[in-house]
Image: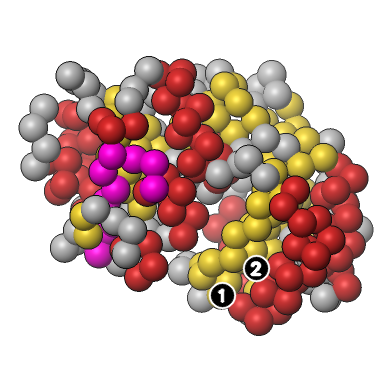
Amino acid sequence: MKKTFITDLDHTFLRTDLSLSAYTQEQWNKKSTHNLLSVATARTYKKTIQFLKNIDINMPMILLDGALIATMDKQVIDTKFINKNIADNIIDEGAKFGIYPFVLALADEKNLSEAFLYSSVLNKYQKEVLTRYTKDDNLQELNNISAMDKNFKIVYMGEEELLRLLAIELENIFGNSLKLILAPEAYVGCYFLTILHKDADKSHGIQIVGEFSGFDMSDLTVFGDNLNDLGMFKLAGTSVAVANAHEELKAYADIVLPHTNDEDGVAKFLQGVTR
């Protein structure tokens, strides 16, 4: 019987420098011969493809925290958007706190082209993040940032206290019509507040991929490191946290690995799995 493996990318499968070792590539690709493998990530399609260019993926990918489900060859399986009016209202509320977001949106569905919108008013954390995207051609700087028609997610980066206050305000306005995730951002040392469609998350994504690919949740093993992985940990038959995972996530894990993402934790686990 085939087994199913779905892994988070950042700080779980990818090393901190965003690379994959030859060992990890070898172990993962060996498993793809007889099993179902994919990823569940906050990353865009564009970035995910860049990171996984030597990796075998044989199921749809859960992208943008579950706002997009798509195959490697750009077949769109499902989307969950924040419409423009709501997104612009969110941006207006953030402006009252003196902070502006990144907006990840769908620019061209036929070619699965994503837009990365950002304000000309940036804090130090946003500036640092953007240095990692200098070669990307989907960046759009806007003096007066506004959303597009189909927005996957809105992301604020900043100090925890400020983002927590903004999250409370957005919850007061929008209630449970949106999904808000506040979590530490490990790359630049701040917090991020991600705002999504209420059904855009990795747990909903796994259910959609499960229906599409025909696997049973009891046969699913997931890997993660942060709080946005919690939903899929609760669904999967086996949940695995890397050694560097958030302590709260570890509490929900069936297995906590002795190895971090920089020590090929996922690959070492896969090597020990029969077939």
Q: Which residue does the image show at 61% across and 78% down from the upper left?
A: 160
The residue closer to the viewer here, 222 or 95, is 222
What residue is drawn where x is 51% and y is 70%?
Answer: 184
- The furthest residue to the bottom: 161
| Mark number displayed over residue 190 | 1
Check disc 2 and give the amino acid type. Met
Residue 260: tell me if it is visible. no
Examine the structure image and report whether residue 239 is included in the region drawn in magenta: yes
What range of the chain is rendered magenta? Answer: 234-243
At 72% across and 52% down in the image, what residue appears?
176
In percent of width and height, residue 250 lies at 31, 63
Task: For the residues labelled 2 and 1, say whether their Cβ atoms are less than 8 Å apart.
Answer: yes
Q: Is residue 73 left or right of residue 10?
A: right
Q: Quadrant of residue 158?
A: bottom right
Q: CA distance from mark 2 to mark 1?
A: 7 Å
Classify 167 as above or below 161: above
